[in-house]
Image (cartoon, rainbow, N blue to C red):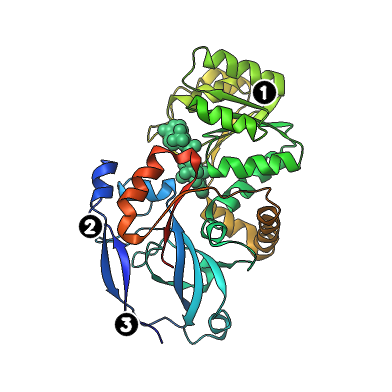
Amino acid sequence: MLPLTYNAIELPAYNANVLRAILGLHVVEKHLEAIPADSLLIRMEAAPCNPSDIAFLIGGYNVVKPLPAIPGFEGTGTVVAAGTESHARSLIGKRVSCFSQSATYGTWAEYIVLNINQIIPVDDRLSTEQGAVFFVNPFTAFGLFEMAQAKKSKAILINAAGGRVAEIMHAFARKHEIKTLGIVRKSKTADSLIQKGWDSVLVSTEENFKDSLQKKIDEMCVDIAFDAVGGELTGLIAGCLPEDGELVVYGGLSGKEIGGIGSIPLIFRELRIKGFNLNKWFLRAGSQKIAEASLLLTEMHLSGDIESPVSIQVKPEEIIKGLKHYLGSMSEGKMLLRFT
Ligand SMILES: NC(=O)c1ccc[n+]([C@@H]2O[C@H](COP(=O)([O-])OP(=O)(O)OC[C@H]3O[C@@H](n4cnc5c(N)ncnc54)[C@H](OP(=O)(O)O)[C@@H]3O)[C@@H](O)[C@H]2O)c1
């Protein structure tokens, strides 16, 4: 028997000050609406906070929902009801990982209504913690790593190397014997990555960082770099890349415009700079590649090659505490909202 109402976290207003945006979040009661023919009702188990959720809360993301809005772009749960279409009905009872940028719904809620294209079935052997973060970062890392493979790179550079996308790319690189050079902003993150087997990690705030970066890129023969920070650091990385080097921008964590890209190296080394967007990758990839990637990622989670560290799990009414914790220690793992 389905309930008539459910609890959800609500954002009343976007606020460029992240702390103020977070302090506005509260739990509200919502009414369950009718389920469209090709859609599913999912009882959520858990949902993470990703950097894209933070960007959304401050009104700095490419998704802007009408207010008040339910945040949360991904999570995991079980399909408990469906519309009239047979494909939708065949999914009732299945555990799924889901992704939604819907204006009406968000994953930070006990229930969500989603189209059948917005879910990936989750292997029953994966834990709730693994299922909750299975959609966004693993497939992003897969899509990014494909670029290094297409280039036959011997070594890759990843900025914001303490994050989950970077961690999964590192797991792929180990599997394919490709060397990894990471950039982080805290020395304790660098120490932990070296322990996890990264070949080299540089701290961007240390003296002589630029010289050390150039030296490592040359020594390790890095020819592709993945940047999630932006600002002047992106330009600095570009300027250190060799002939035919490639720079892929997949995040803007600093909130700053990319700068400092020298025209001389760009022209004479024929450098390439491009963006990566997971939504577009899914459209390009097609269902067979997505299914193959899903299988590989499931195996890598089960074997322990990919970890999904969670630094704190909170109930909906503890959302503010959870988000503050996540923002203070992002490299340690995700904050998970638990609904069950
Ligand atoms: N383009 C796409 O389709 C796509 C898809 C998925 C993810 N992404 C992006 O990928 C990036 C990483 O996401 P994630 O989930 O892997 O992150 P995460 O696990 O939450 O970790 C974030 C990492 O970024 C570091 N960081 C945060 N702000 C920074 C700054 N201003 N300068 C330098 N480092 C900073 C943190 O280090 P500290 O511990 O030092 O805070 C932490 O290591 C995000 O920008 C996200 O939006 C993009």
Q: Mark 1 points at which residue?
A: 243
Q: Mark 2 points at which residue?
A: 12
* Foreground disc of the pair 3, 2: 3
Residue at (63, 57) in percent of width and height: 285
- Secondary-structure class at tag 3: loop
Residue at (68, 33) in percent of width and height: 197
Amino acid found under the numbered disc labelled 1: Glu
Q: Residues within 10 Å of mark 1 (few under 14, many from 20)?
A: some
Question: Is residue 57 depicted above or below 33 in this figure?
Answer: above
Q: Which mark is residue 54?
A: none
Percent position of residue 246, x then y: 62, 32
Amino acid found under the numbered disc labelled 3: Leu
Name the quadrant containing residue 4.
bottom left
Q: How crowded is mark 3: few (under 14 residues within 10 Å), some or many (20 or more)?
A: few
Percent position of residue 97, x then y: 54, 64
> Which comes sooner in the sequence, label 3 or label 1?
3
Q: Which of 305 and 256 is in front in this view?
A: 305
- Secondary-structure class at tag 2: loop
Q: Is residue 204 visible?
A: yes
Name the quadrant containing residue 11.
bottom left
Q: Residue 4 carries which label?
A: 3
* Foreground disc of the pair 3, 1: 3
Q: Is residue 228 visible?
A: no
* Mark 3 vs mark 2, CA separation in Å: 23 Å
